[in-house]
Image: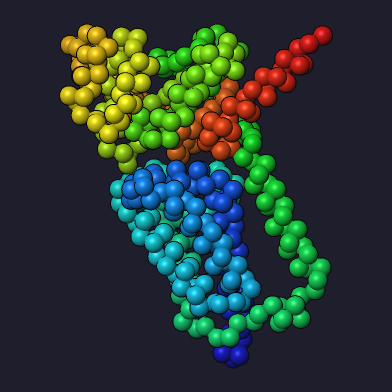
Amino acid sequence: MIRRGWPWVSLLLRTYLGTVFIMAAISKIADPVFFLKGVHAYGLLPMALLPAVAVILPWLELLAGALLLLGLWVWPALLIINGLLLVFTLALVWALQQKLAISCACFDLLGQGELISVKTLLRDIVWFMLSLTLWIGHREPLGLKAVWRYFSKKSIQMFLLTGLALLTCQTGVHASFSATYQKIDLTGVPYVGSADARHQMVVYACFTCPFCRKEIPSIKAAVESGALKGQYAFYWKLWPLMSHQGSFAAAEALMGAHAQQKFWPYFELLAKDPEDISLDHFISVATTLKLDIKRFTQDAGSDSVKQWVQAAKQEGYTLGVKRTPTFFVDGYEYTGKNKVEALLPLLVARLDHENHLRKP
């Protein structure tokens, strides 16, 4: 009985796993930078490999998922899926052992992300077991002709329309903000722009994160002398990543410079050699800026600075921050692509709209 019904069991499993992998691939293909940041947070791959992985892996997922759904070259497709799920599972085990508070970066259709947990690990293990079951019990699958005989054209059309709706939802979400207002404590937070500006933008960012170091200067320039000048105040809540060596020390050094009103010049000099996160380098940069070195070392190593950094870190967790950089505009999280090229035009368009409404 089981063997007689296996083709249909196989069809159900292939449909489920194929759909999972296709949906997982869609968001990654639509926003490879978003996916790249998620992979980078694991700290398992060198930076040189990340761009290739961020581009190739989602298309590999899409190909394997499509082959499973169509019943074509099922063995190669299952080999790819089993390999990917094994890698994903091992990566999750390592990340959980390291107690990393990062996004799964594996199934992120709406770009919202999910913090890894035992539940995430168990889900991937279940998918791995289902894929192994298909591989071990593989028979000639029900292909397109058999599926066509059992399902009407209207059902297939509904399936295609559902996929199109999901794709539309995906592109729409990446140009929006969350609907939930968040109260953010800005006491003592380094910023540029006017404190009484109409709008506030807050970024939770880690100095040791290369994406943060790339994007923050562009936002800062737009607020200081670009399209956002006079309209926005830009605040940086230091949010050091547990997975990045030296991230907390760098955050404390930046706050030590902030105590002498040199946060941004210190950041700019420190970013010229971001790989050097030694105490000697921190002091060397402070010396270049002619800071009071005794005061700098005392402030950077003080309990008050450590507590401030930890409080900012905890606040980020409370607000749902999962990766860096994460932007909040007027208390609403930006849920689109974490790229200056996407965020800045959106903010400028909002300002233009506000100015248009103010015209008599």
User: Is 139 placed above or below 241 here?
Assistant: below
Question: Residue at the spot x=61%, y=77% of the render?
Answer: 71
Q: Is residue 194 above or below residue 136?
A: above
Q: Nearer the viewer, residue 110 or 338?
A: 338
Residue 115 appearing in the image: no
Q: Position of residue 17 (x, y in %)?
A: 56, 67
> Is the N terminus in the top left, top right, bottom left or bottom right quadrant?
bottom right
Q: Is residue 128 left or right of residue 244?
A: right
Left or right of 356? Residue 20 is left
Q: Position of residue 119 (x, y in %)?
A: 45, 55
Quadrant where the image shows the C terminus: top right
Front residue of 91 and 302: 91
Above or below, comparing residue 166 to residue 259 in the picture:
below
Location of residue 112 in the rendering, given as x and y in whole percent from the top left corner = 55, 43
Q: How many marks?
A: 0
Find residue 303 and report its image quarter. Answer: top left
Q: Is residue 354 left or right of residue 317?
A: right
Q: Quadrant of residue 323?
A: top left
Report if residue 275 is visible in the image: yes
Residue drawn where x is 38% and y is 51% of the image: 49
Q: Quadrant of residue 284?
A: top left
Task: Please name whichever residue, 322 or 1, is drawn nearer the observer in this view of the structure.
Answer: 322
Q: Position of residue 95 (x, y in %)?
A: 34, 50
Q: How is the image coloured?
A: rainbow
On the picture, is 27 further left or further right than 325?
right
Question: Is 171 in front, or is 269?
Answer: 269
Q: Residue at x 82, y 68 (%)?
A: 154
Residue at position x 39%, y 61% in the image? 87
